[in-house]
Image (cartoon, coloured by chain):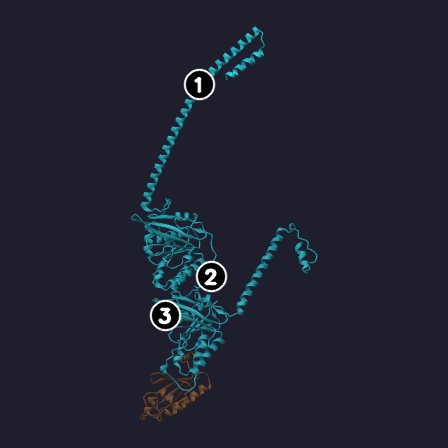
Amino acid sequence: MLSSEVRSKEGFDYGAPRQPKVVQAITRPELDKISQSLAKHMKRIRNTHGQAKSSVSLRGLEKAPTGIGGLDEISGGGLPRGRTTIVCGGAGCGKTMLGLEFLVRGVEEFGEPGVLLAFEETPEEMTRNVASLGFDLKALSDKKKLFLDYLPVEPSEIHETGDYDLEGLFIRLQHAVDSVGAKRVVLDTLEALFSGFSNMAILRAEVRRLFRWLKDRGLTTVVTAERGDGTLTRHGLEEYVSDCVILLDHRIQEQISTRRLRIVKYRGTRHGADEYPFLIDDSGLSVLPVTSATLNHKISRERVSTGISDLDTMMQGKGYYRGSSILVSGTAGSGKTTLSCHFADATCRRGGRCLYIGFEESTDQVFRNAASVGIDLNRYVKKGLLFHRAWRPSQYGMEMHLLHIHKLIDTLKPESIVIDPVSNLIGSSTQRDVRSMLMRLIDFLKEKGITALLTTLTRGGNHLEATEEQISSLIDTWILLRDVEQSGERNRCLYILKSRGMAHSNQLREFVIRSEGISLLTPYIGSGRVFTGSARLAQEAKDSSEALLRKQTIERKRGELQAKRRELEARIENLRVEYAAEEKQMEMLIHQAQNVEHRLELDTQEMAGSRQAGLSGDRQNRKHVNGAQA
Amino acid sequence: MKEKKTRGKTAGGSHVAKDVFELRLYVAGQTPKSLAALANLKRICDEHLKQEYRIEVIDLVKHPQLAQGDQILAIPTLVRRVPVPLRKIIGDLSNTERVLVGLDIRGPSAPVAKAESA
């Protein structure tokens, strides 16, 4: 009622207040009918919403997906459909590969036939080059899905006299497009033309006409071009095409090469502007947008076991949070790898998939060593739960490592990942690069909800509670392993330096690696010091003997006390007996005295009776005499 | 459109080469450039070529697949198939001097030394 009043004040006319419907009047079938029509209605709303969404994107720039992993993501859906994209870069940076993959995937995944005009390589050479990537160009051209044409430009054979144009190129292109019904065209190093023809005025006009021609026919085109000195392309092709320019780069740093891709320009669309590392491997190109630095990953409240029940106990008896990142740092030989193996073992035992990346030890070595402490990792490999990959940190640059891990995660979809150790990466790159790479890796893992265990080696002389990679602030749970050297032995200690979001134990625990795995020893809570190994045993023995001594002293004192009490009691009893005897004696004497008194009185009365004298006066006199005597 | 034109020269001439010139002119339709090229070619051959020659005109608009054989990009292109080596001259052939150099023909009006130096 209140709301209707408010509304009427605001000027809304709701008419007479509606009669509320009687709920009981609706029968079950009616209710079903209502809910059905409601569901239909909702579906329609949702559909129209979806259509509205897609029509919005249609109104924008239409994209032709490349099918190249990652490139579609950073370009917002692919290359501009019906327009020309320039792919430029130095020698050997993968321009042709990108173009070819664009064509092949266009045919295989998007049903769009393509044409490749190669100015530098023959179709046979090209077919051979990409066969290793699983691209069968011959089969595709046999199926009339792909048209390969080779247009060599030999400046030595060509003499120019007078006016000409490149109609031949257009005719051949038209022929190629018509013969397969192409939607995509790749012109591989169009700039070869510039070396073959000397009349720049004609050439430039013709190149401009070519781009116009391609655009008019709605062909999605990739033109590759050599990188120029200070310009994007050597002959300024970017002046003609201004829709999309992709720059590929191949850089060597610390003797390790990294390929990078950058979208320099993409008219009419939002795109990632960073340099993205990319990889050419046996499945073609893959670009991974790895510079995402968002901090909005969903977190889990679920807990996963550490693989060591005692360690679980230290973390409220539950272990790590799922999807958190754990750092295990420690000096050499402090048991980092064994701890990692336990974690991998626990993941697989639950039936989860685990990816173990080793930068130091080969697969066999890790498995043998794990078996020596009672962890059989081989059976999980056979079950397809554990994936161990080992490579040298120096094998790739930082970005490549990241890409590799990304790819592995994408294909294997593990629940948890172990990287052992990340400190080895330092050797192959600068600290800043490693930190940046690990930060992005941890971000990525968190986004995917993958529990990550990283180990890092603390070198001798370094501060224990700092990592060389300076990643400790990114880490959720940090377990410190350290050696304690004491009375001629080294013993291992474990300590949870931090663990976000849980009440964890603050104890420094000694742990031992036995043939059945790691176990933590019950904490020795002594006099302010930590004792490990035999010192701990000695201290325990000493402590127990001291305790025994104390106990004996107490016993003795207690006995003494009891004896004293008994003595006291005996004396009290004695006194009491004496007293009782004395009392009896006294009472007897009193009695006798009373008797005497009584007799005297009787005698006096008798005497008074016989003398008939005044009793009272007589008595008074005697009292007076008594008082004087007293 | 394929045209073949041959012209026989009187046999037994002292400076007649053994080879017959086989020339192919690639055009694309009846464009002014193509027509000019054909006219220029005929004129040059008549004026300067002492050997027997054969001109084949190929219209790529009608036979686009033929462009691949001689790797034609520019139009018009004149290809000297015989004698070897293969030579290509592009353009409307308006510069007679350059055509002669391109075809490697020593015309009477072009002294030997000049042709070679050019």
Disc 2 crowd rating (10 Å Cα; few below 14, some 14-19, many 20+) is few
Q: Are marks 2 and 1 in contact (CB under 8 Å)?
A: no
Task: Name above or below for residue A157 compared with residue A431.
Answer: below
- Nearer the N terminus, badge 2 or badge 1? 2
Nearer mark to the viewer, of 2 and 3: 2
Determine which of the numbered discs, if any, sits on residue A582 in the image. Answer: 1
The residues tagged by marks 3 and 1 sit, at their Cα atoms, a distance apart of: 132 Å
- Nearer the N terminus, badge 2 or badge 3? 3
Q: Amino acid at mark 2?
A: Thr
The residues tagged by marks 2 and 1 sit, at their Cα atoms, a distance apart of: 102 Å
Q: Quadrant of the N terminus of chain A?
A: bottom right
Disc 3 crowd rating (10 Å Cα; few below 14, some 14-19, many 20+) is few
Q: Determine which residue is flagged by label 2.
A: A294
Letter of the chain that mark 3 sits on in the rendering: A
Letter of the chain that mark 2 sits on in the rendering: A
Which element is circle 2 on? Answer: loop
Chain B colour is brown
On the same chain, marks 2 and 3? The answer is yes
Task: Name above or below for residue A610 compared with residue A72.
Answer: above
Q: Amino acid at mark 1?
A: Glu
Determine which of the numbered discs, if any, sits on residue A129 in the image. Answer: 3
Task: Name above or below for residue A412 compared with residue A531.
Answer: below
Which element is circle 3 on? Answer: helix
